[in-house]
Image (tube, rainbow, N blue to C red):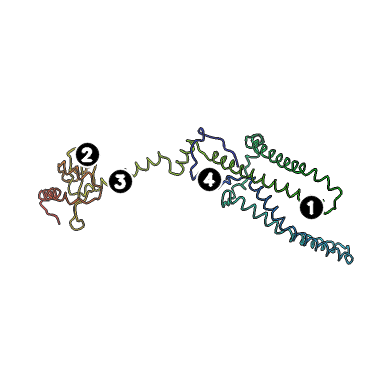
């Protein structure tokens, strides 16, 4: 896992889901090699103890068949090649279950640590790693020092276990001088099994500790600085300045569309200078008058100017103007305001000498 230099201050913020996913896609996940080592050593040893009788039976049969056919064997190049291929094939078949087990253990020991992950990014050449100065820095980095200490500690503990076990069995080994060969082999097998079982227990314990440490270390690496959080927010949500510009542009375009509706309005009701609301009514298409434009202060002044330029009547009615200004653009006049608005429209139609169609 590549180390990253902190930028923008101390890493004090919890990692986001996007940062976790980015690290996964780069292959930077919490993976303890000690877990893989412990799983491979322990499960392979257990399998070998169970499979060993079958293996030795098969190997004995193979050696016996070769020995029986030794008299008829001709030492020609083709015969030697054929015999070699036969031996490799038979031994390979005997060892295939062990190889398959190793592959399965290797896969699942990684899968249970960080789940399913298929990415080619770790395979992409990183030429920055060829920098000798950076390489020396990694060689003497904090992580390299920790890994060295872990390796030395593991080797020391395994050596101590083997030495202490053999030392405890030393007096028992002395009396084997006058015993049979089978008794000696049984003693050696039991002692080796005891050492290996203790080593397995040690590796499992170390794997558990290392797994917790690796997960903690990865969480520390995933943490973000405040600056990194801001930059990620900009990438995922967009630059706030750009978004503000877009909103301003959208508002400007909406305002232009709204102003284009003022000349089509039947009336503009004012406050008289603070508010202005343009309404329109078409009995053939509308159940009630609708608000086509509204605004306050400068916008209200602009609505009044456009209304005057297009001979749209301006009606001063502060209470109605305030109520209409609360409605959304395109909203129909509520029923409780029908009477007041109808009176305004009736007055306008009488001035124009026409009636609603």
Going from N to C along the chain, the mark reached first, 1 or 4, is 4
Could you give the CA–CA distance between mark 1 and mark 3, rounded to whole angstroms?
93 Å
Q: Residues within 10 Å of mark 3 (few under 14, many from 20)?
A: few
Q: CA distance from mark 1 to mark 2?
A: 107 Å
Q: Which mark is residue 81?
A: none
Mark 4 Cα shell of 10 Å, populated few (<14), some (14-19), many (≥20): few
Q: Quadrant of the N terminus?
A: top right
The C terminus lies in which quarter of the figure?
A: bottom left
Q: Label 2, on which residue?
A: 301
- The residue that appears at 73% across and 40% down in the rendered structure is 160
Mark 4, secondary structure of its residue: helix
Q: Which residue is painted at 51% across and 43% down in the image?
A: 19
Q: Earlier in the sequence, mark 4 or mark 3?
A: 4
- Residue 132 at x, y = what percent? 67, 36
**217 lies above or below 264:** above
First reached walking from the N terminus: tag 1 or tag 2: 1
User: Sequence-wise, which precedes: disc 2 or disc 3?
Assistant: 3
Question: Residue at (48%, 43%) from the top-left corner?
Answer: 16
Question: What's the CA distance linking mark 2 and mark 4?
Answer: 53 Å
Q: Is residue 176 above or below residue 13?
A: below
Secondary structure of residue under mark 3? helix
Q: Is residue 222 left or right of residue 37?
A: left
Q: Nearer the viewer, mark 2 or mark 4?
A: 4
| Mark 1 Cα shell of 10 Å, populated few (<14), some (14-19), many (≥20) | few
Residues tagged 2 and 3 counted as in contact (Cβ below 8 A): no
> Looking at the image, which is closer to me, 89 or 329?
89
Q: Secondary structure at mark 1?
A: helix
Q: State the image coordinates of residue 119 (x, y, percent, origin top left).
A: 58, 50
Considering depth in this image, is 128 or 137 the residue closer to the camera? 137
Residue 254 image label = 3
Q: Which residue is mark 1?
A: 186
Residue tagged by mark 4?
22
């Amino acid at each position: 896992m590549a180390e990253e230099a902190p930028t923008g201050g101390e890493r004090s913020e919890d990692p986001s889901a996007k940062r976790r996913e980015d690290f996964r896609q780069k292959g930077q996940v919490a993976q303890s090699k000690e877990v893989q080592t412990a799983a491979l050593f322990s499960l392979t040893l257990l399998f070998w103890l169970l499979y060993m009788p079958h293996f030795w039976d098969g190997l004995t049969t193979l050696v016996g068949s070769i020995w029986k056919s030794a008299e008829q064997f001709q030492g020609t190049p083709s015969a030697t090649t054929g015999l070699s291929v036969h031996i490799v094939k038979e031994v390979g078949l005997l060892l295939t279950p062990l190889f398959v087990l190793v592959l399965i253990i290797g896969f699942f020991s990684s899968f249970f640590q960080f789940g399913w992950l298929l990415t080619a990014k770790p395979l992409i050449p990183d030429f920055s790693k060829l920098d000798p100065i950076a390489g020396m820095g990694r060689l003497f980095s904090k992580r390299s020092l920790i890994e060295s200490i872990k390796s030395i500690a593991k080797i020391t503990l395994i050596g101590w276990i083997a030495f202490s076990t053999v030392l405890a069995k030393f007096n028992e080994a002395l009396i084997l001088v006058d015993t049979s060969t089978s008794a000696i082999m049984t003693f050696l097998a039991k002692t080796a099994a005891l050492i290996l079982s203790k080593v397995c227990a040690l590796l499992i314990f170390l794997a558990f500790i290392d797994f917790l440490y690796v997960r903690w270390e990865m969480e520390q690496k995933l943490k973000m600085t405040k600056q990194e959080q801001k930059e990620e927010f900009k990438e995922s949500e967009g630059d706030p300045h750009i978004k503000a510009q877009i909103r301003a542009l959208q508002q400007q375009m909406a305002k232009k569309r709204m102003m284009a509706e003022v000349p089509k309005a039947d009336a503009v009701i004012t406050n008289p200078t603070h508010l202005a609301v343009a309404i329109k009514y078409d009995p053939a298409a509308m159940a009630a008058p609708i608000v086509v434009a509204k605004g306050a202060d400068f916008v209200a002044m602009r609505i009044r100017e456009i209304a005057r330029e297009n001979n749209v009547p301006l009606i001063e009615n502060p209470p109605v103007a305030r109520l209409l200004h609360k409605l959304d653009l395109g909203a129909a006049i509520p029923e409780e305001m029908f009477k007041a608005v109808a009176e305004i429209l009736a007055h306008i139609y009488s001035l124009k000498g026409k009636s609603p169609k």
